[in-house]
Amino acid sequence: MVTILCFSNNEIRKLSMKELSQHLQQNEGIIWVDMDDPSEAEEETLMVSLFDFHPLAIEDSQNGRGEESHLPKVEDFTDYLFVIFNPVETPPTNQSRKTFHGLEIKTVQLSTFLSKRALVTHHYKPLSSINYAMQLCEKNPMTLGRGPDFLFHIIIDDIVDNYTPILDQLDDAIDTMEDEVFHSAGQKSMARILDLKRNIMTIRRIALYQREMLNRLSRGEFPLITQDEMIYYRNVYDHLVRMTDLAESYRDVVSGVLDAYLSVTSNNLNRVMKVLTIISTIFLPLSVITGFFGMNFKYLPGAEWE
Amino acid sequence: MVTILCFSNNEIRKLSMKELSQHLQQNEGIIWVDMDDPSEAEEETLMVSLFDFHPLAIEDSQNGRGEESHLPKVEDFTDYLFVIFNPVETPPTNQSRKTFHGLEIKTVQLSTFLSKRALVTHHYKPLSSINYAMQLCEKNPMTLGRGPDFLFHIIIDDIVDNYTPILDQLDDAIDTMEDEVFHSAGQKSMARILDLKRNIMTIRRIALYQREMLNRLSRGEFPLITQDEMIYYRNVYDHLVRMTDLAESYRDVVSGVLDAYLSVTSNNLNRVMKVLTIISTIFLPLSVITGFFGMNFKYLPGAEWE
Amino acid sequence: MVTILCFSNNEIRKLSMKELSQHLQQNEGIIWVDMDDPSEAEEETLMVSLFDFHPLAIEDSQNGRGEESHLPKVEDFTDYLFVIFNPVETPPTNQSRKTFHGLEIKTVQLSTFLSKRALVTHHYKPLSSINYAMQLCEKNPMTLGRGPDFLFHIIIDDIVDNYTPILDQLDDAIDTMEDEVFHSAGQKSMARILDLKRNIMTIRRIALYQREMLNRLSRGEFPLITQDEMIYYRNVYDHLVRMTDLAESYRDVVSGVLDAYLSVTSNNLNRVMKVLTIISTIFLPLSVITGFFGMNFKYLPGAEWE
Amino acid sequence: MVTILCFSNNEIRKLSMKELSQHLQQNEGIIWVDMDDPSEAEEETLMVSLFDFHPLAIEDSQNGRGEESHLPKVEDFTDYLFVIFNPVETPPTNQSRKTFHGLEIKTVQLSTFLSKRALVTHHYKPLSSINYAMQLCEKNPMTLGRGPDFLFHIIIDDIVDNYTPILDQLDDAIDTMEDEVFHSAGQKSMARILDLKRNIMTIRRIALYQREMLNRLSRGEFPLITQDEMIYYRNVYDHLVRMTDLAESYRDVVSGVLDAYLSVTSNNLNRVMKVLTIISTIFLPLSVITGFFGMNFKYLPGAEWE
Amino acid sequence: MVTILCFSNNEIRKLSMKELSQHLQQNEGIIWVDMDDPSEAEEETLMVSLFDFHPLAIEDSQNGRGEESHLPKVEDFTDYLFVIFNPVETPPTNQSRKTFHGLEIKTVQLSTFLSKRALVTHHYKPLSSINYAMQLCEKNPMTLGRGPDFLFHIIIDDIVDNYTPILDQLDDAIDTMEDEVFHSAGQKSMARILDLKRNIMTIRRIALYQREMLNRLSRGEFPLITQDEMIYYRNVYDHLVRMTDLAESYRDVVSGVLDAYLSVTSNNLNRVMKVLTIISTIFLPLSVITGFFGMNFKYLPGAEWE
């Protein structure tokens, strides 16, 4: 499904493919093309014929069709910026009640082409941040009217905000895990700790790559991001710095939990062994004593005792 | 509560909001506005109407209302510097007598706007460093008279000085922990070591971010910090270098304590097992001997023995 | 075996050694010389007499005859670039069905000389990427016609693509290993985990060196790579970034699996000890009781009991 | 105690405070002022009145009065360099015969002010390097005559040379520890290893900071260090590089010793358990056999056996 | 013993000390002075009187007389380069058959002074690389005739080549160790693994320092290394890169072997405990049963059974 919004004369109109072609030729209005799970024909028409994007960029954006999304990156093609972002797939709501174990953080791929007068967003899975931006455009036409770089900032800001509940979930999961380790450490705890660690590593990796990317976007390296918008990109950058910081500290905590797990296991062994030793210390001598008096000697000392 | 101090004609006077507005228009005197847990109306009037700060900076400073404080940072808005600092919340005095376990180092957020003639400090929790600076101003008007950058240096210097007792507490806690590990290592020790480690990581993180920030403030990157004051900022930077250094070495020591803990546990197991083995080595053979003489053979060697 | 392709007048012809000599003197056409396990005589004629490459570069390329391939590198000899690449030897197909254990990732050496009008590839083992490029040239003469740097990019792109199945194999092996560790951790698991780790380290090292190399090739450091082709080299670079990223995360996961292995071993010990303790706790006292009633006292309490 | 040496007309004379004041006004001779545990009055007169050093530098140098010495640093005040160095406190000789355990490496603080014609050294504890330099001056007046930067180099060179016996002591301690671990690993070994590790970390930290400092001093960053003397500072730098290198390798070795300790403990457990198992394997069946023949059946097979 | 070779008129002649002095004054010919374990008098005459080297450089080169060699470094004294290299002492041949344990990699020190027309090599132990270069000079006078920088490259190239057999030995030792760990892990294995690790760290350190040095030598930082020779130094640099790479991977493997060792130990314990548990599970109940029937009750169920 392809949605085309055009801002001109202070209002936003939906365009058909044909109208888009005219607008592009007359170079009027600010345009946002959102390609939500587009067919190959639509991709051909829009990205190749109308916008004439570089084949490698198109290939990279089509990579999102598969299982694994492309790593975040930004590439400058002079006329347009090609940016790949990794939003996190929103899990179905009924799953959010499940325990953390089994939940796997999955990133999807959002490919964007940012030029002077147009923003093209391309993705194969529905994205809440795109919907959010679309609703903003409906309410306030100036959302698009302030330019594609402003609109783009709104989308990625929302994507980064969406990481927060996941970080909170991880935080809760770590707390639960810590309690579990000290109170009922079993075989399954280990598997869960590893699971947790892997999720944290994933989040950390996404944060690191996108932080680096936003650092470049926010320090004026690309002329397509105007001076005025740079401060907003800096803001998104700040959020990602905080996120990396959190992920790093989570990693430390989880490695601490792992140490605790191993030590609790070892302590349990100690306790079990102590019980065994106490029992042996009491009953082995007793056993020898009773054995002694069970010996078939004719004259056994104390045998007359009643 | 908002306190407004104005230095002009070598004396300091308290201003009302209205007078502040006039002073700002006439551009006279040096002004310090301290906003201690301000109402939203006060924030609106001061930060938006009077000083016209950037919306993103205001948003960042209002973030301190929540649980988690924003990471330290410095941002240059040409007319003013926006600096976030992380003082450490002073725990109530009766708590300081408690053992270390359970004490959690909490940072609060101090947002400051530093312009040529004014310093605006904004925080939601009472800060001893702000009170200290205010008392200095009362005693010596020149504290404010030497300019907002000098006053700002006094505040952050005091904040950094306040970290010292916490580092000392951590040092004591490590010593106690080490003794405990070698003399009575139990399950709880592990939890306490993890706690300690986490507090050290927190302190280290604060120190690292603020050190980086003060490095930038002290090397002349921002024209709002005058040449003369830079050496004072370098001094604060030095304190933070020492602090990071201490935190790093604490981390090393704690990881050593952890190793010691694991080895003590393992040694305990060894001791228990040795006891068990000695007892078994003595009593199992004895048991067999008594059993031997308890056998119901007709002619048992030695059965005649008395 | 030496294959010489020459592109001129929009078609590709195979040349003999003699014809090559003429073409080089007349400086016409674009030439690709592939030396597949060449004899020493062929090496002498081509690399020394005809192309006059630097003795050290020749020595480095002949290093590939031995067991260990030279590390990837790029060297600029003004007239030509000397590039060493490390493709991965394709294991025979029937081996791919074997379990991962025992499979060792082996790199071979591809040495290339890239000049303005000629590409010389030199290797001692057959390479699928070279065959692939040769087939492309047959289908479309422009593959060679766009210049040696374009052709070279096609070869290394295919080499990098060939790493993907190996990474997938590693991924599968890690999953299998994880299951194995939690369900039947034996002595052999440890050896396999170490094996896996070593393979991952190998892949990571190749990726790191070649990434660094492609970074240099793609940022315009060498004038022999034309501006237009640079974006293609950037693309290969991106693939290698992803590969390093994967290898890094595999390393993390494998170290997690190792931790899990140790903890599972430790848990097994705990379980065994618990069984031992329970049995001792039940039967040692019983043994004492039966021993008690087996004592040869004249009047034994309860002995009348039937 | 304050000692003031003045070099003029090829000889060295001791000056009183008053004479110093005159010399400074007439700007003649080269002066070395050594303040060995000065009173506050002396500090006031010399550092504030006569030399007019910056208050922050004075504060930093007075920090050495306390327990913990300031980290090494160098600061440029245009007219003079302020350098803090960390010599190691020489332990009393009778202690050097003690075993390593319990010896704690303690750094003291030497603050120096290096200007064009004067060197001021300031410390609260007697320093052998200062005494050594003073003796050199007595023997050869040119030691001071070649300028304050030459004299300063002699002092820090001797300080760095004094680290060598400590490194040798650490080396011996590691060797002893290694033997101990493999032959009689007890609970105390662990505490000693941790002690050793901490001392090594201390030495490493000092070396790292001072190496960085000497790197700056030796590469011509400060005009107060003349071109001719730079090579001597480079020499001290080289010694510190070697020292850091040694400290790093010691750290590796000690972590290896720690691994060995844990493995030896674990091996001991194995040995103990094997003994227990062998004894149980022999005597438990024997116990059952004797028990069998002790059963009160009327017709017991073999009971007739003699 | 001092050997002086002089190249002039396309032939090489041996010179006496006196002739050397003349040649130096007339500034003719290319000279190589090799000082093999020189007496102090020879050092005085050559390095001080004739060549007038800097006292610090002479001191550094004399450091090689002691046990520990100076770390590799290069220093530019404008007229000459002072370079310290660390060849590896060749162990006596009969020792090469011994097992690896006990072999300690020892570095010796080669100090070289490289000027425009002369090369001075200074060492206290016989070096095979020096002998090798001397033989080359005899065979082909141009070895010296191409300049001191070419000759110097030949010496260090041979030194670096001599590391290869040691790396191969380490590789073999690791393989042996791995087999040993999985088949017969005893207390001694641990000591050997630590030994191996230490040797690898030594090799790695040498490689790292010399790589850094050759990087500087090969990138045109020193004008005494001519443009034409730089590529040869780059070649030596490449060898050292490969060596560092190998040492790094050995380190990884050895740390894996250490993990394996600990896990094998732990598995052994598990096996022993399982045997103990099985035996207890079988014989403790049996013991109770036999005990039961050994009780002295008058009416014992089943006692009539034969």
Image (spheres, coloured by chain):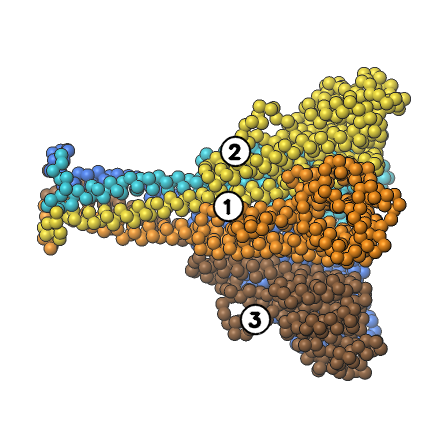
Chain colours: A cyan, B yellow, C blue, D orange, E brown
The answer to whether D36 is drawn above or below residue E78 in the figure is above
- Under tag 2, what secondary structure? helix
Residues indicated by labels 2 and 1 sit on the same polypeptide chain: no
Does C112 sit left or right of D196 as displayed?
right
Badge 3 is on which residue? E91
> Looking at the image, can residue E110 be seen?
yes
Q: Position of residue B291 (x, y in %)?
A: 19, 47
Hey, what amino acid is under mark 3?
Answer: Pro
Chain for numbered disc 3: E
Q: Residue at x 28, y 48 (%)?
A: B282
Q: Position of residue C253 (x, y in %)?
A: 55, 48
Q: CA distance from mark 2 to mark 3?
A: 59 Å
- Under tag 3, what secondary structure? loop
Q: Which mark is residue A176?
A: 2
Q: Position of residue A214 (x, y in %)?
A: 73, 41
Hey, what amino acid is under mark 2?
Answer: Thr
Badge 1 is on which residue? D191
Q: Nearer the viewer, residue C246 or A269?
A: A269
Q: Nearer the viewer, residue B234 or D28?
A: D28
The crowd level at tag 2 (other Cα within 10 Å; few <14, some 14-19, many 20+) is few
Q: Residue at x 70, y 38 (%)?
A: D63
